[in-house]
Amino acid sequence: MKCVLFYHAFSSCWNNGNAHFLRGVARELHALGHEVIVYEPADGWSRLNAIKDGGNASLREVPALFPGLHTRAYDCTLELDEALDGADLVLVHEWNEPDLVKAIGRRRIADGRFVLLFHDTHHRAVTAPHELGRFDLAGYDGVLAFGEVLREIYLTLGWTSRAFTWHEAADTALYRPLPDIEPQHDLVWIGNWGDNERSAELREFLVAPVASLQLDATIYGVRYPEDALTSMRQAGIRYGGWLPAHRAPQAFAKARVTVHVPRAPYARSLPGIPTIRMFEAMACGIPIVSAPWDDVEGLFPEGTYLRVTNGSGMRDAVRTLLSDREFATDMAATARGAVLARHTCRHRAQELLQIAARLNRADRRAASAQFEGAAS
C-alpha cells in the first residue's frame, strides 16, 4: 500500500512535539511493508526556527534515523496530482495550511481511490475553534483525534461525520532505556514554555519543588521568556535550550526522575490526553511524577507513575523516587511494560491500517448499494 503523509514538519521537531509520534508512525508503516512518502513545506516555521537555533546538524541527522522513508520538501508550489498518484492512504496533519487541506480534499472528491484522513493533535478545538473552522473537510473520509473527548467534539460540532480516537504513542526504536549511560542529574524536564498555557503549572510543579529540594536539574525546550529563565536560574536549574527529539533518550538516561506537566487546556478541557512526554519517559524507563490530569481513558495502569495534586505533593513524590531507588526502578519497569504492551508506534500504525480497511469496506458497500439502486 502507498501511504502519503502531509506533515507540517518531519525533519524538524523545534516546538513540534508531534514530530516524535509522526515520525514513528511513518517508520512503522514502512516496517510493515508499505511505501511511505512524507511531504513537508521547505519554509515551515518549525524547520526555519530549528535552522535559526543552530539546528542544521540535527536536521541532517534525521533521515538516517528513518531509512526507507521518502521525504520531500516542497516550496510554494506542490503538484498534488503527482503527490497523490497511486496513493492508497493519505494522512493530513492539522498544522498544514487550510488551502492545502482543502485542495487535498477536493482531489479525494474527484478521485475516490484513496482513503483520506485528517489528523488532529492539538487543543484548538476548545481554545480556538474558529481556527479549526477554517478547514474544509468535505472530502475527508474521517478524522483521527488524539483523544476520545476530541473525537466527540468533532462529531458534536459537525466538522465530520466520522471520527476515530487515535492516541499518540512511543517510537520504541528510538525511545528505550540506555543502561550504558550513568545518571548524572536528579531531574530532567523536556518541554516548551509555549504561550503561557502552563506557566503557573511549571512554577508550581517544576521550579518550586526543584528549588525546595535543591536538586541538580536540567530543563530543555524553546520559547522561554526572560522571566521564566530568571526563575529557573534562581532555583538553580540549568537551561539546555532546544533538544532535538531524537536526543531525548540520552537526556532521560542522564537523570533519575522526570515530571509530567500538561498544558492547562488539556488538563482542564481535554481530559484523557497526556503529553507525548508521558509515552517518551515511560518508554525510556525513567520514573515519572505527574501534575494533575485525568486519565479518563485508562491509558496507563495503576503503578506506572505517581500522581499529585499540588506543588507540595510533587516535592514529596520526587523526593520519594530519589530516595527509594528500588521503588523507582520497579515503577519505571511497570510503566515501560505498559507502553510496550499498548502504546508503541507499531500499535498505532496497525490501528491506522485497520481504520483505513474499515473505511474501504464501507465505501465498497456504499458503492454497491448505489449501483444496485440505480439498476433497480
Image (cartoon, rainbow, N blue to C red):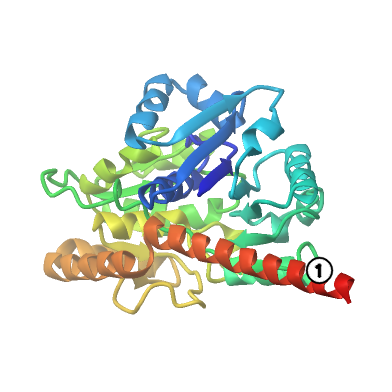
Say what secondary structure mark 1 lies in: helix
Residue 146 drawn at (x, y percent): 56, 62
Across and down, in percent, residue 24 comes to: 41, 48
Q: Residue at x 50, y 59 (%)?
A: 262
- 313 to the left or right of 181: right
Camera-side residue of 242 and 322: 242
Q: Residue at x 47, y 23 (%)?
A: 53
Percent x, y for residue 228?
A: 50, 40
Query: Is residue 226 or residue 159 the one in the foreground?
Result: 159
Q: Is residue 179 left or right of residue 76?
A: left
Q: Is residue 103 above or below residue 56?
A: below
Of 307 and 317, which appears nearest the observer?
Answer: 307
- Image quadrant assignment for residue 8: top right
Q: Quadrant of the C terminus?
A: bottom right
Can residue 167 be seen at all in this image of the molecule? no
Label count reads 1
Looking at the rendered structure, the kind of residue marked 1 is: Phe
In the picture of the structure, the residue carrying the numbered disc 1 is 371
Which residue is at a point 45% across and 57% down the rendered structure image? 349
Question: Which residue is located at x 73 percent, y 43 percent?
Answer: 104
Mark 1: few, some, or many residues within 10 Å (few <14, many ≥20)? few
Q: Position of residue 183 (x, y in %)?
A: 16, 47
